[in-house]
Amino acid sequence: MDAPAIFKKLRLNDTGALLIVNAPAEYTAILKDIPHDTTAEAGKKYDFVQVFATSQSALERLCAEVKEAGKYDCLFWACYPKGTGKIKSDIKRETVWTALELAGVQAVTQIAIDDTWSALRGRPPAMVGK
């Protein structure tokens, strides 16, 4: 994984509070010394929220669980295996929209993290297009 390229796409930097949930080992390895939480701390609001899942049910559960963790209009990313990748999954880009809605956000941007993972960014409906 090319950390600088991935972080640029995600607009991730090491400032602010970061919540990265269920990340695969290869992604965790590139985070190195970037401080982040892997579970939401009660009462803490995050500038960056990222969840990884390999099934639609897990993605929906994680998005619902972190719904209140992010600051309004935080960088919110739902990450899922690419359809052409080596990880088998029932997640499709269109079904990620449903999961994002459970977090109170709408899909706005899709990126490829690497050959295995895609990510879809969500924003509050009032901020879409702004």
Image: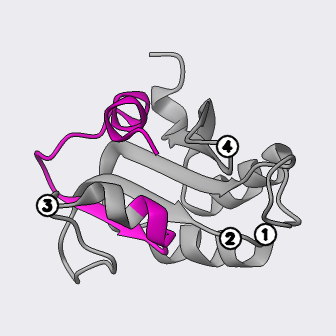
Tag 4: residue type?
Answer: Asp
The answer to whether mark 3 and mark 2 are in CB contact below 8 A is no
Q: Is residue 5 magenta?
A: yes
Of pointers 4 and 3, the one earlier in the residue sequence: 3
| Disc marking residue 60 | 2
Tag 1: residue type?
Answer: Gln
Q: Which residue is mark 1?
A: 56
Q: Which residues are magenta?
A: 1-27
Instruction: Choose between 65 and 33: the one closer to the eye.
Output: 33
**Label 2 – label 1 distance at C-alpha:** 6 Å
Element type at marker 1? helix
**Mark in front: 2 vs 4:** 4
Q: Position of residue 114 (x, y in %)?
A: 59, 42
Q: Which residue is mark 4?
A: 115
Element type at marker 3? loop
The answer to whether mark 2 and mark 4 are in CB contact below 8 A is no
**Mark in front: 1 vs 3:** 3
Q: Position of residue 35 (x, y in %)?
A: 14, 63
**Mark in front: 2 vs 1:** 1
Element type at marker 4? loop
Q: Position of residue 12 (x, y in %)?
A: 29, 40
83 lies left or right of 64: right
Q: Is residue 106 above or below residue 89?
A: above
Of pointers 1 and 3, the one earlier in the residue sequence: 3
**Label 2 – label 4 distance at C-alpha:** 23 Å
Tag 3: residue type?
Answer: Asp
Total marks drawn? 4
Of pointers 1 and 4, the one earlier in the residue sequence: 1
Residue visible at 10% across and 45% down in the picture: 15
Q: Which residue is mark 3?
A: 33
